[in-house]
Amino acid sequence: MKGERVTDTELRADPNPLIASLVDARPPLNMRSVVPSDLNFILNAWMESYRDSPFGAEVYNNIYYPNHQKLIAKIAGRPKCVSVVATSEDDPNHILGFIIAEPQHETMDGERVPLIVHYAYVKNAMRRLGIAREMLLYMGWGPGHPIVATQLSTYLRGHGRYLMKKFKVIHNPYVVMIDDWFRGWKD
């Protein structure tokens, strides 16, 4: 599901002066579906960046790695889950980041389920250039709408807290365990 692509003009108008000033430093982006050759990058980035999170820090390696890989497979296998990589426009094999998410949708009962982001990752050198925001827009998110995040990494300690507030991120790890978690959901 393709959302609206954010333009460089919109990024330059971002209230965060860092994002606005660094737009020209970001390579032109391309969004594409995940292909098998992307899987090692995604698994490694997700598992290593999440390893030191409050959830993963105290889990023994022999428990964490095999079980977290199974959790990622379970998440990616959810019926509405979409996996997308952001790449350099010049080189579609040069991955800058990825997002694993379930776009906003309505249930058969008419309940609106917000964008569910299971994991979004941008390479360190490419952070604060609007790549994560563009991935969110690609997934159909709109400014002002809430985002439900099921996995939070250590990046969310500093600048990440600001991003959580700015993007109205609500942490709900139970989404992957309970199918009807959204009953009675209100923005």
Image: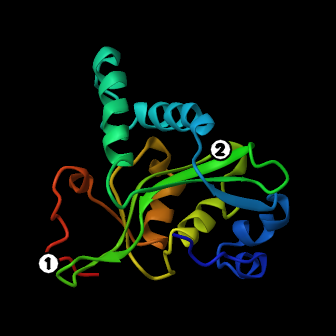
Residue 186 picture location, percent across and down: 23, 81
Q: Residue at 76% of width from left, 49% of height from top?
A: 92
| Residue 34 in view in this figure | yes
Residue 142 picture location, percent across and down: 50, 80
Quadrant of the rendered image containing residue 71: top left
Kind of residue indicated by mark 1: Gly
Q: From what the image shows, is residue 97 above or below residue 103? A: above
- Please tell me the numbered disc located at residue 123: 2
Depth order, front residue of 81/158? 81
Q: From what the image shows, is residue 37 above or below residue 124? A: above
Residue 161 picture location, percent across and down: 45, 59
Residue 129 picture location, percent across and down: 71, 60
Kind of residue indicated by mark 2: Lys
Q: From what the image shows, is residue 183 above or below residue 111? A: above
Q: Residue at 31% of width from left, 42% of height from top?
A: 74
What colouring does the structure picture have?
rainbow
Q: Which residue is mark 1?
A: 184
- Please tell me the numbered disc located at residue 90: none
